[in-house]
Image (tube, rainbow, N blue to C red):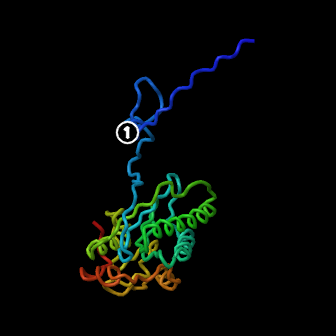
């Protein structure tokens, strides 16, 4: 029997990173300019988050999946408040929040960027498990990575607090609100930076202020003192 002739082995050539990224004409595979899943409008960048000091608060936004009914309902708010309360950690704290139809706003502090990531992920897991059960649904509740904006100055902090606590006025600019209205789907009832005391002039307000506080009182200067140099928050303000 004739010996089977062995095919000559192709000599392996180690490519540089730049060479590996260049597409070869007429061949499939490899990197191509513009290849990959198209970026959706409003998608959050996955770039590495910057390191920040532990005394710099964050404005965090969590987007809800398309097709999920509005979370701004009293029955669901009990679940959300409880999840926020149970997500408070030594190195991650939620100080203010607001629940809109398809997203949540938070004011947080975290010891490090990984503490912010873990703390936010823990809150998302609690919310997804409990809200999916309450809504009789399955699947991701938060399909995108959270968005965090660091607040470095007293002015930035005040603007962010106003935006979070009064956000419903921002989305419903034509609606008229009562002079001393507070948002029942936010942490406004426990916020201590109002220019005037909260008026418990309606049953729903009295019920709110009697609830156990789900948020943590801040300890960093920007949230306790700094932002107040630009004036306490008024009930009749509207976010820009």
Task: State the count of labels.
Answer: 1
Relative to 84, say whether 200 is above or below.
below
Q: Position of residue 141 (x, y in %)?
A: 54, 58
Which residue occupies the extreme right position in the image?
1
Identify which residue, 132 or 24, lies in the foreground: 24
Q: Position of residue 152 (x, y in %)?
A: 29, 72
Would you say 152 lies left or right of 111 here?
A: left
Identify which residue, 123 or 172, lies in the foreground: 123
Relative to 131, say whether 97 is above or below.
below
Q: Residue 48, located in which quarter of the rendered image? A: bottom left
Relative to 175, say whether 89 is above or below.
below
Relative to 46, say whether 38 is above or below.
above
Residue drawn at x 25%, y 81% as measured from the top left: 231
Q: Position of residue 65 (x, y in %)?
A: 50, 54
Q: Residue 103, located in which quarter of the rendered image? A: bottom left
Which residue occupies the extreme left position in the image?
230
Image quadrant holding the C terminus, namely bottom left
Would you say 155 lies left or right of 117 here?
A: left
Which residue occupies the extreme top position in the image?
1
Crowd around label 1: few <14 · some 14–19 · many ≥20 (10 Å): few
Q: Which residue is mark 1?
A: 18
Image quadrant holding the N terminus, namely top right
Identify which residue, 212 or 181, lies in the foreground: 212
Residue drawn at x 39%, y 64% as measured from the top left: 148
Which residue occupies the extreme bottom position in the image?
197
SS state under label 1? helix
Identify which residue, 36 or 72, lies in the foreground: 36
Residue drawn at x 60%, y 20% as measured from the top left: 7
Q: Position of residue 104 (x, y in %)?
A: 45, 65
């Amino acid at each position: 029997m004739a010996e089977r002739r062995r095919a000559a082995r192709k000599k392996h050539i180690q490519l540089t990173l730049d060479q590996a990224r260049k597409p070869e004409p007429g061949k499939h595979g490899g990197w191509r300019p513009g290849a990959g899943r198209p970026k959706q409008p409003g998608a959050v960048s996955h770039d590495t988050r910057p390191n920040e000091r532990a005394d710099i608060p964050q404005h965090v936004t969590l987007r809800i999946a398309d097709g999920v009914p509005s979370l701004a309902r009293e029955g669901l708010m009990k679940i959300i408040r409880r999840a926020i309360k149970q997500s408070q950690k030594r190195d991650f704290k939620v100080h203010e929040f607001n629940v809109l139809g398809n997203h949540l706003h938070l004011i947080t502090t975290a010891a490090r960027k990984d503490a912010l990531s873990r703390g936010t992920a823990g809150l998302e897991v609690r919310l997804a498990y409990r809200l999916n059960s309450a809504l009789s649904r399955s699947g991701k509740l938060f399909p995108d990575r959270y968005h965090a904006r660091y607040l470095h100055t007293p002015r930035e902090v005040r603007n962010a607090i106003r935006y979070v606590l009064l956000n419903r006025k921002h989305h419903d600019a034509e609606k008229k609100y009562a002079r001393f209205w507070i948002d029942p789907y936010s942490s406004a009832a426990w916020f201590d930076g109002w220019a005037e005391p909260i008026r418990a002039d309606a049953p729903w307000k009295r019920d709110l202020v009697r609830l156990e506080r789900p948020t943590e009182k801040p300890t960093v200067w920007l949230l306790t003192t700094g932002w107040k140099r630009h004036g306490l928050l008024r009930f009749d303000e509207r976010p820009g």
